């Protein structure tokens, strides 16, 4: 019915439009996303915190230097600092590009100039830019198996064909790379999720392969600022003489993932295209945040923060590995790992089904751990667990592991 003020209520001449349906639901409309979006699930790993939280990918937010950061941000939101408020250089704030170039030179031995650096909204956007610049729909992309899932989903969403390449104790198995891969995404410093370091001879073999196949190597160095022993190996970027490596760094582990800050070190031949890709994607990363981070690095606060965080994570890493080796000796074999925020451990006897039951029992006891299989494309030859120590304080590790141990039959 239709009501008209002063006249009365009449039977309406038209059916109500579908969006006003009486059940309150809006009609879904005629538009449909491309089918690929139906095969991409939203993230679930970060849905809920557990009492004993061994999930990977999370740094300890309590270590974040809130006071200093607040002070720097306040300064950047001053009228004088904001200036005209015009759009800025897609490649990034000049001070931050210079600070990052110095930082990667000092910490990773990467000989980058500020011109080689592009500031991004985290690793994920960095990979998006590289993929847009290098890949055509249907191109083949090789990724580590097991590996980090978000890049796989990204490449697929852009129409690439993603193939998994096995990883052994020395890193990606170079002979298993498909000859037509245009781009290879790797985590050589600290394989995600196994935790191994790619051996030098593998790095050289991979570089040689990429040079011969004219393929790009995307080196994701997401957490190796935290090291607890051994000498770090040269990044692929440093060993590269052919300009085939794109190096990707992130502030998600060193500061906070919610800042969405990362960067690329790009070979000269790709530089302009990457700047243009950044421009058409989102013009540039938040300028006040970039300026604050530049000051944070230049003032020495970043180095201080890394030293402090490194000491905390080292304590957790060492404790975790010690208890795993001591109390789980009959069940798990720890994969050696001396960097980052997680370790993995392979089962000695249990089947994949039995490990599922262990993880479910642990969850009931308040312990969140992830399984290697969750990161794999092909079922792993040996099931295993991945244990992060970014989100769990040292004081909770032993009790968490005691409960995990009690979850094994
Ligand atoms: C392998 C790997 N790369 C990169 C990242 C960080 O991604 P982003 O910089 O997009 O937060 C993570 C976070 O878990 C990771 O595991």
Image: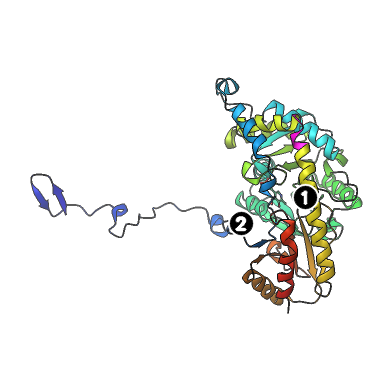
From the viewer's perspective, tell me whether residue 21 is left or right of residue 7.
right
Q: Is residue 255 left or right of residue 14?
A: right
Residue closest to the far left: 7
Q: Hey, which residue is sitting farthest front in the picture? A: 395
**Residue beneath label 2, please?**
46
Element carrying mark 2: loop
Most common SS among magenta residues: helix
Q: Based on the displayed image, in which of its 4 quarters is residue 251 positioned? A: top right
Residue 23 shows in this picture: yes
Magenta stretch in the rendered image: 299-303
Q: Residue reaching furthest bottom?
A: 409
Q: Is residue 298 above or below residue 263?
A: above
* Residue hosting label 1: 312
Q: CA distance from mark 2 to mark 1?
A: 22 Å
Tell me the quarter of the picture where residue 87 sits: top right
Q: Give the residue drawn at x 71%, y 77%.
A: 354
Where does residue 382 sit, x and y in percent of width and height? 78, 70
x, y (%) of residue 125? 64, 42
């Amino acid at each position: 019915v239709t009501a008209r003020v002063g006249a009365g209520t009449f039977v309406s001449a038209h059916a109500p439009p579908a969006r006003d349906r009486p059940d309150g639901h809006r009609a879904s409309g005629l538009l449909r996303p491309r089918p690929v979006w139906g095969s991409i699930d939203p993230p679930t790993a970060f849905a809920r915190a557990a009492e004993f939280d061994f999930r990977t990918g999370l740094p300890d937010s309590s270590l974040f230097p809130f006071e200093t950061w607040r002070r720097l941000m306040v300064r950047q939101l001053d009228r004088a600092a904001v200036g005209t408020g015009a759009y800025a250089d897609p490649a990034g704030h000049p001070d931050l590009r210079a600070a990052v170039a110095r930082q990667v030179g000092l910490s990773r031995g990467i000989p980058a100039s500020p011109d080689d650096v592009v500031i991004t909204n985290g690793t994920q956007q960095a990979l998006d830019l590289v993929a847009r610049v290098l890949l055509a729909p249907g191109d083949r992309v090789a990724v580590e198996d097991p590996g980090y899932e978000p890049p796989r989903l990204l490449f697929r969403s852009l129409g690439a064909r993603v193939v998994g390449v096995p990883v052994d104790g020395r890193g990606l198995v170079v002979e298993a790379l498909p000859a037509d891969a245009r781009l290879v995404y790797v985590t050589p410093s600290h394989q995600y999720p196994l935790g191994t370091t790619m051996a030098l001879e593998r790095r050289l073999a991979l570089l040689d392969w990429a040079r011969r196949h004219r393929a790009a190597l995307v080196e994701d160095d997401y957490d190796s600022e935290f090291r607890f022993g051994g000498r770090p190996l040269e990044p692929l970027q440093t060993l590269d003489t052919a300009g085939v490596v794109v190096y990707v760094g992130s502030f998600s582990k060193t500061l906070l993932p919610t800042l969405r800050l990362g960067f690329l070190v790009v070979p000269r031949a790709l530089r302009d295209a990457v700047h243009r890709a950044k421009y058409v994607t989102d013009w540039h990363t938040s300028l006040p945040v970039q300026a604050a981070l530049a000051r944070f690095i230049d003032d020495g606060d970043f180095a201080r923060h890394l030293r402090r965080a490194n000491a905390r994570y080292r304590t957790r890493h060492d404790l975790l590995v010690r208890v795993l080796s001591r109390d789980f000796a009959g069940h798990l074999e720890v994969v050696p790992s001396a960097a980052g925020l997680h370790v993995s451990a392979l089962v000695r006897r249990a089947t994949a089904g039995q490990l599922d039951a262990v993880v479910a029992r642990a969850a009931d006891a308040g312990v969140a751990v992830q399984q290697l299989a969750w990161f794999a494309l092909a079922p792993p030859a040996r099931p295993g667990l991945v244990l992060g120590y970014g989100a769990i304080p040292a004081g909770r590790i032993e009790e968490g592991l005691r409960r995990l141990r009690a979850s094994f039959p």
